[in-house]
Amino acid sequence: MDQLFLIKFLIPLLWAIGFTFAPKQNEKAIKLYALIGAFVCLAYSVKMYFDLPNPGLLTELFKFNMPLFFNMTYTFAMDGLSALLLILNSFLLLMVVIATWDIKTDKLRLYYFLIFALVWAVSGSLLATSLYGFYIFWEAMLIPLFILVGVFGGENRRYASFKFFMMTAAGSILMLASMCYMSAMAYKLNGSYDLTYDVIKSLNLHYDGFWSPQSLIFWAFSIAFFLKVPVFPFHSWLPDAHVEAPTAGSILLAGILLKLGIYGFLRFVIPFYPQAVDAYRDIVLYLGAIGVIYGALTAWVQKDIKKLVAFSSISHMGYIVMGVFSQNSFAVKGAIFQMVAHGISTPGLFIGVHYLYTRRHTKKLDQFGGIAKVMPRFAILFFLITAGSMAVPMTCGFVGEFMITAGVYEINKIVAILAATGIILSPIYLLKMYHLTALGEITHEENKSLKDLSLLEATPMIVLSVLTILLGLYPKIVTTMYEGTINFFTHSGL
Amino acid sequence: MENLTFVQNVLIFIALNAAALLSLNIKKFGKYISFGLSFIAAVTFFSMLYSRDVFTLGDLFTLDGNKVFLLKLVSLLNILMILINGYSSLEKVKSTLLVSYMFLGGVFLLGANELITFYVALETIALVGYALVATSNQEFSREAAVKYLVQGSIVSAIFLLGAAFYLGATGGLTLIGATVVNQELYAIAIGIFILTACFKLGAFPFHAWIADVYSNVSLGNLATNFFISKIIIGYKFITLLQLLLLECDPHFVNILVRIVQVIAVASAFYGNIMAVVQGQFKRIIAYSSVAHTGYMLMMICMTPDESYEKQLISYLVIYSLTATGVILILNQFAQLNKNKDGRDILTSGFYRNKGLAIMLSVFVLSLGGIPLTAGFAMKYMLFTNFFKEGFNLETTSIFISSVIGLAYYIRFVSDLFTENTDKMKLPVIKTRFSESLVHVIILLSIFTFGIAPSLFLGLK
Amino acid sequence: MYENYLALIPFFPLLAFLINSLLIKNKLNNIQAGLITFMGLFTSFILVILLSLHVQEVGPVHVKLWDWMNYKNIVFDIHFVMDQLSVVLCLMVTGIGSAIAFFSIGYMDHEEKVGKFFAFFALFAFSMLLLVVGENFLVLFMGWEGVGLSSYLLIGFWYEHTKNGNAAKKAFLANRVGDFGVVLGMIGYALVFNTVSFRDLQHPDLAIIAANKNLLIASSLLLVLGVTGKSAQIPLFIWLPDAMMGPTPVSALMHAATMVTAGIFLLCRVSNIIIHFSVVLDVIAWIGALTSLLAALIAITQTDIKKILAYSTVSQLGYMVMACGLGAFSTGLFHVFTHAFFKALLFLCAASVIYGCHHEQNIFKMGGLKSKMPVTFWTFVIGFLAIAGIPGFSGFFSKDEILSMAFTNPGNGIFLYSIGLISALITAFYMTRMLVLVFIVPPSHDVHDSHQHHKKEDDSHNGHEIHESPSVMTIPLLILALCSAVAGYVGMPHIFGGHENSRLFQTFVEKFTAHPMGHRELSQETEIIMMVVTTILILSSMGLAYYIYVIKDHERMRDKIKAKFLGIWIISSEKFKVDELYEIAIIKPLYQVGHFLVDVVETHIVNGFVKLITKAVSGSGNFLEETKPAKLEVGILYIAIGTALIITFVFSAFTFR
């Protein structure tokens, strides 16, 4: 039991509260304070990984009992997977702080407060292993992002933030319903409302057909997580949220929040409802495959560059859902890797779009063209990140997609072939984006005088491109972290 | 105080209030004197409650364990409301006096063991309610008062019919320990009692009066109305019906339970859907109370045991507290914009008064059931128990309706945080010390209940 | 010691790439950038020579750099091998690569941002070497796509003109369609044989092959799709002619000598498996034959010098793929070997011609360069003789062996032989046409005024007179000419070189690749007769071309021919409308589907569903709002109905009793 855990865990929140006392006028101090905070968060998340005795198993970090809240115990534990996502989470926080260094707003303290609160909520849900802890942080995540998009977003940000909040909250209410049902069962079974890991396991709800408790609860959880991931039919909030969200919101949303839906599956659905997972595996696989193709084709047709990137992340997340649900150890390992890879390439794209937006104040693709001549450094870095997103073999994008396609190939050939078409489709829209922005003649007068990236602006993209290449060539850095946990997530042991 | 019997205390309470009433027409200091007197009356009654743990008045009236606990809470909140109403305007002091009579009615209703006292107490609360609506000088308050009066009287007539059936079924009017002779009559009587409960609490088919009354009562009265009538009537009806259902023939029980569930789900959906489309705050609060009544009515179908009553009390108290908090803050915002009630008075509230805006968002999120607030604890507690009782379908449908509820609660927050362009012109809101004190109290109680509900419920 | 030689081979071009790309900004002048890339390639060339000697005596050399991933017992690791197959390809890539690098120092000297060109050049060499020395599918695929990526970068080098960018994008997407096949094929093999390393795939055990026949056939066909993508065969060859937008040395290096041969290399790598499936072999053979015929037909009517060479490359690639399809992988590889030399030579000659004529690429505008550019002319003649298949030159040996392999192949061998022969004749025809029009026929009148036009344009070029290219360009031409003349003797048939030093190349390569199966024995006499007949036919078609284009006035002749078979002429000159066919058949409908998805599915179904819910809630809300009991009597009516319902409900319980 790690005594220091509570302090380390609360660092982002305390740092966020620190912002309220920061001097209002002195923007430099606030930004510096945020930067230091980001570094501290990254450092502590890396340290927590190295403190883990065995990243393969869930090591209990902290367990506190709430006798007054229906005698509920909240357990916090951590294994390789949550450590990996935690590091990604604080890494993206650092990227956000650096990338949006030049933000000009009079509500700077609120801006950073919301970002740090969001990061804290995400780290909370990553560490909580009792269903209630997870649920509380899951809900807590929605509010800072809701306000972030609502206050700092684009034109019809209210509609986008409202739609985002309502769809994810509706999903989580479904989750709450099934949690209440399970705690009622738990109360009958052993007299306490608790829903820690072993209590859920001891419930072993029986499964026969759709209307049995296990499948209903499975679908309640799945819909909640489908809405969050988002999987094909439930994704209508993502494009609006991304187009309207400020860059910080988009980066954190695409980088880590979408992964929490997948993390929820891995942690709370797959280990507990084996029969339901097996019964509905094909449906979800086909949904994932459709998501891949649907995301790619709709991205290809988009006029707005941020919407294009949003739809591209639907396509990537389709891959991940397929990997997770195929229950094949290689595909699951690939899916988790793809989560990290997507968490590197898509934020890179959003940072690139942010720089284009701050220079030309437009997100329309036809406004750009021939920027490589004027901004060579941006063109090169943007190309490397697009290559990563296009799953070119020596980059991180390829590793995950290859493993998922290979793993799913063993389970269901048609789905694997459908997914493999992603290899053809993803360069179509990504190259279209790259050609319309960076290559070709300079058609618009303003593009002639664009300033290339300063060193500070370039650092996040440089870091992300180096990571793209590094993880592509040597993926073992990441896979060793969560390799041990795979057999928890593939109950059928394929 | 201890040696005085219960009756003497009540007499003192009435005397003090009567004196307060008389002192109103003293020219200069009338308001202050009557305020002081009514305050003293409330405090003495509150302290009386601590003298003994059981109060009986022959076999007509007994106050024991949970009821006394509830009464303590309600009288404490009553004192709080008297403070809020303050002594600034004559009209406010008048409504405080009316409310204290309503409180008295509530006390008798709570302890009533047989139908006559039950009926009398119910009528006193209703009458004072009509008066409260009539005296608040809103646009259509007189018209709303008349409508409320007519509907109320019809329902009390039906209640008497029910009492007659009850007499026929059990040969007596005592509510406790009655032996049921004729099951059919007994079932009809319970049916009618359910009906009156639905009307008094404002469930779906009988909610007609809620929207008018709530939108035509001044915000201060609305808060007081919430306290006394809602909590006591809700508690008394639900526990009474739970007891009555015990003696009823199981064949009838599942019919009656089915009725209650249908009403509960219908009013949950109705309340939430109507609240989404409303433009004015009072109407939003009215329909959200319809929805919450829906959640509450499900409690009738549960088998009564010690912890359920405690949970019911905490649900009622916390819900009323949060709703009052919301009303008070909206009252603050409304005062700035010449008492308008539209939603635009809230825009960029965050930038005008950070404290108020954050508190309003917390209260609203608690009503919506977002974790770490009392609302979440209530919702979780209630629905787990419903699942325990096996009402799976009804509870899931109520969950779904609460999603719609979330829509208009979160709209409050988004209004607060949206920044309209000319925010400079809207002045920053100043709050009086007493109001901010009350807000803080409510905020603290919400968080404490949210984090540690067993404090109230005394769960093992 | 040899292991780290092997590890260093891809490292040097990578080093050159890093130096060039990182130092672009501080103005590395063109010569230095070119030299760095040349040195990178040349040192690898030397290492490859050392290793090839070692491999000849001892056998393959392996080095494992680091572990990448593993799944059950399949080990994916970064693992290099230098076996017989990869020695040949490495020699070609590094040898011809360094020659072309040396050449392009001169060719590209007046361009700006040349550092970037040489960086991509080195990146291409690195990925090609990765592809060749890869010991397992993973490293091969890394090289495979790396090559695709660097060809995208090089074709789109002059990205200012959008048509170059689009050509680059088209090349990359066509390759990606191929890669789709390679990935699925790779996974199929990995799951069946539980390994991705070529060392194990070289000796697959027949039981497994028999057990899952269909899966293996499907995977092999998918691999063939990848081959057609990379080596520009029938379905996916559309990108090669457009790839000519890039600088000519790039076309010489990638789209003639090295990159396009990757497909045949992959076939040789998996030859031991696909040899067992006659279905797959037939498909490959027919694809190869038809491609060579189609490309040859198109090449006749092309006017751009680089397009002619591009289509001739496609047609020669058709030959190699046909050879693999006949099971004669080593013969195919021999043709790859010889073709690399003379095609690189032809392209470089074309480059020096273009360089001389101030970037004029239309052969009808050139003419009479024989006197002005003697070195280029004579080296071009050698290349011409090689590609036409005149005995004694390298083309003859390899092409003739393929034709004899086709002839002796049972089943449909005779058809393949006839197609191969026809396309050989057409090759001879259009090559003579090009030789004659560019070098021999005096420049027609309109060439002169085009010079005035050019003179005004870029006076920087010293004088408007056409003159021989500088020595830095002619030296590689001479070297390549020598090689393309001599290269044939390495794999001579028995007739010439007697038994011991004949087919040296093939026997060396066949240590790795599979041996052809079921070929009829060919007596010496028939072989000689066949050679004589083919040579006579080739000489006659060369004479015909000479007759048409030199003696007759070729404008009138062309109109006459055009009049006679107008239809074929137009179709052929319009590249058989293949690009438009793809546009209409695949790209347009896919775009429509995209629009459909966005306009209909996204707005109406996905968002529509959400709007439906919100509309349902607010709609029912508004409806209820209207019907709410505002008036008193309606309120009372509600109460009455409510009571009535409850009571009837309770009464209903009575009747059931």
Image (tube, coloured by chain):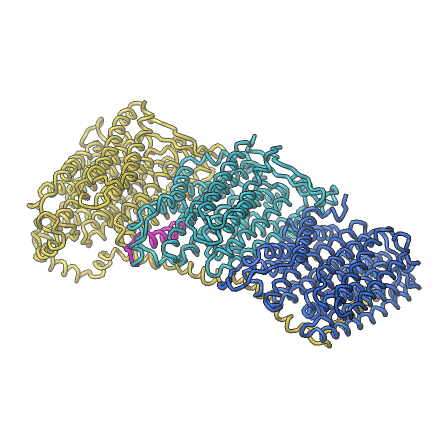
Position of residue C529 relative to residue B453, above or below, is: above
Position of residue B395 relative to residue C338, above or below, is: below
Residue B45 picture quarter? bottom right
Judge from the rendering whether residue B294 lies leftward or rightward of residue B340; answer left or right.
right
Q: In the image as oriented, which residue stretches furthest toward the front? A: B28
Specify whether residue A110 is in view: yes
Tell me residue C330's x, y (percent).
Answer: 29, 35
Tell me residue A136's x, y (percent).
Answer: 62, 47
Residue depicted at x 61% and y 33%: A3
Specify whether residue C543 is in view: no
Tell me residue C422's x, y (percent).
Answer: 22, 48
Closer to the camera in the image, B419 or C19: B419
Closer to the camera in the image, A224 or C215: A224
Judge from the rendering whether residue C243 lies leftward or rightward of residue C382; answer left or right.
right
Chain letter of the blue region? B
Residue C538 picture quarter? top left
- Quadrant placement of the C terminus of chain B: top right
Q: Name the main secondary structure of what is drawn in magenta.
A: helix
Chain letter of the yellow region? C
Closer to the camera in the image, C164 or B166: B166
Magenta stretch contains residue A442: yes
Residue A196 picture quarter? top right
Closer to the camera in the image, C241 or C276: C241
Magenta stretch contains residue A293: no
Residue depicted at x 59% and y 36%: A5
Residue depicted at x 79% and y 54%: B70
Q: How many marks?
A: 0
Tell me residue B370's x, y (percent).
Answer: 63, 52
In this picture, which residue range is highlighted in magenta? A425-444
Chain letter of the cyan region? A
